[in-house]
Image (cartoon, grey):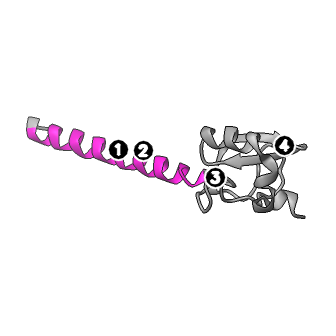
Amino acid sequence: MGVIEMKDFVYRTTLAIFIVLLASFILSGCQPNATVDPASGSAFKQTTCPVMVNTPINRQVNTIYKGKKVYFCCKGCISRFKANPEKYLDKLPQFNE
Protein backbone atom coordinates (compact mmCIF):
# COMPACT_ATOMS: atom_id res chain seq x y z
CA MET A 1 0.00 0.00 0.00
CA GLY A 2 1.50 3.30 -1.07
CA VAL A 3 1.53 6.57 0.88
CA ILE A 4 -1.36 8.04 -1.11
CA GLU A 5 -3.44 4.90 -0.69
CA MET A 6 -2.71 4.88 3.05
CA LYS A 7 -3.78 8.54 3.39
CA ASP A 8 -6.97 7.78 1.46
CA PHE A 9 -7.67 4.77 3.71
CA VAL A 10 -7.09 6.82 6.88
CA TYR A 11 -9.26 9.65 5.56
CA ARG A 12 -12.15 7.32 4.66
CA THR A 13 -11.92 5.45 7.95
CA THR A 14 -11.86 8.69 9.95
CA LEU A 15 -14.80 10.03 7.96
CA ALA A 16 -16.80 6.83 8.55
CA ILE A 17 -16.12 6.96 12.29
CA PHE A 18 -17.12 10.62 12.39
CA ILE A 19 -20.39 9.91 10.58
CA VAL A 20 -21.25 7.06 12.95
CA LEU A 21 -20.49 9.22 16.00
CA LEU A 22 -22.47 12.15 14.61
CA ALA A 23 -25.45 9.92 13.87
CA SER A 24 -25.41 8.46 17.38
CA PHE A 25 -25.17 11.95 18.86
CA ILE A 26 -28.11 13.18 16.80
CA LEU A 27 -30.21 10.13 17.61
CA SER A 28 -29.47 10.44 21.32
CA GLY A 29 -30.98 13.91 21.10
CA CYS A 30 -34.33 12.20 20.64
CA GLN A 31 -34.18 10.90 24.21
CA PRO A 32 -35.77 14.02 25.79
CA ASN A 33 -38.88 13.36 23.72
CA ALA A 34 -39.30 9.85 25.09
CA THR A 35 -42.78 9.05 26.34
CA VAL A 36 -41.78 7.07 29.43
CA ASP A 37 -40.04 8.39 32.54
CA PRO A 38 -37.09 6.07 33.14
CA ALA A 39 -37.19 6.73 36.89
CA SER A 40 -40.84 5.90 37.50
CA GLY A 41 -41.73 3.92 34.39
CA SER A 42 -44.88 6.01 34.00
CA ALA A 43 -45.92 7.86 30.87
CA PHE A 44 -45.07 11.53 30.48
CA LYS A 45 -48.06 13.76 30.02
CA GLN A 46 -46.44 17.16 30.35
CA THR A 47 -44.65 18.22 27.16
CA THR A 48 -44.43 22.00 27.49
CA CYS A 49 -43.14 24.37 30.15
CA PRO A 50 -45.93 25.82 32.31
CA VAL A 51 -44.09 29.14 32.63
CA MET A 52 -42.84 29.66 29.06
CA VAL A 53 -45.98 28.57 27.24
CA ASN A 54 -45.50 26.33 24.16
CA THR A 55 -41.79 25.82 24.96
CA PRO A 56 -40.76 22.14 25.10
CA ILE A 57 -39.65 20.86 28.49
CA ASN A 58 -36.20 19.64 29.42
CA ARG A 59 -36.81 16.54 31.56
CA GLN A 60 -33.58 17.19 33.44
CA VAL A 61 -34.99 20.48 34.74
CA ASN A 62 -37.74 19.69 37.23
CA THR A 63 -39.04 20.11 40.74
CA ILE A 64 -41.51 18.29 42.96
CA TYR A 65 -44.76 20.06 43.80
CA LYS A 66 -47.41 18.38 45.93
CA GLY A 67 -45.71 15.03 45.35
CA LYS A 68 -45.66 15.31 41.55
CA LYS A 69 -42.80 16.13 39.22
CA VAL A 70 -43.15 19.34 37.26
CA TYR A 71 -40.86 19.86 34.27
CA PHE A 72 -39.55 23.13 32.84
CA CYS A 73 -37.61 24.38 29.85
CA CYS A 74 -34.89 26.02 32.00
CA LYS A 75 -33.87 26.54 35.63
CA GLY A 76 -35.14 30.13 35.65
CA CYS A 77 -38.68 28.87 35.22
CA ILE A 78 -38.45 26.82 38.42
CA SER A 79 -38.07 29.93 40.58
CA ARG A 80 -40.91 31.69 38.74
CA PHE A 81 -43.10 28.64 39.30
CA LYS A 82 -42.22 28.39 43.00
CA ALA A 83 -43.10 32.07 43.51
CA ASN A 84 -46.73 31.37 42.50
CA PRO A 85 -47.35 27.71 41.64
CA GLU A 86 -51.15 27.97 41.66
CA LYS A 87 -50.92 30.33 38.68
CA TYR A 88 -49.50 27.52 36.51
CA LEU A 89 -51.43 24.44 37.69
CA ASP A 90 -54.07 24.67 34.95
CA LYS A 91 -51.25 24.21 32.39
CA LEU A 92 -50.05 20.97 34.04
CA PRO A 93 -51.83 17.77 33.05
CA GLN A 94 -50.57 15.96 36.15
CA PHE A 95 -52.75 18.30 38.27
CA ASN A 96 -55.81 18.21 36.00
CA GLU A 97 -56.53 14.47 36.08
Q: Closer to the camera: disc 3 or disc 4?
A: 4
Q: Which residue is mark 2?
A: 21
In the rendered image, residue 91, in percent from the top left (x then y), is placed at: 75, 61
Taking depth in this image into account, of 12 and 40 the one nearest to the observer is: 40
Q: Which residue is mark 1?
A: 18
Point out which mark residue 57 bears: 3
Density class for disc 1 (Cα within 10 Å; few <14, some 14-19, many ≥20) is few
Magenta residues span 4-31
Q: CA distance from mark 2 to mark 4?
A: 38 Å
Q: Closer to the camera: disc 2 or disc 4?
A: 4
SS class of the residue under badge 1?
helix
Main SS, magenta residues? helix
Earlier-in-chain disc, 1 versus 4: 1
SS class of the residue under badge 2?
helix
Q: Closer to the camera: disc 2 or disc 3?
A: 3
In the rendered image, residue 46, in percent from the top left (x then y), is placed at: 74, 58
Earlier-in-chain disc, 3 versus 4: 3
Residue at position x 47%, y 52% in the image: 26
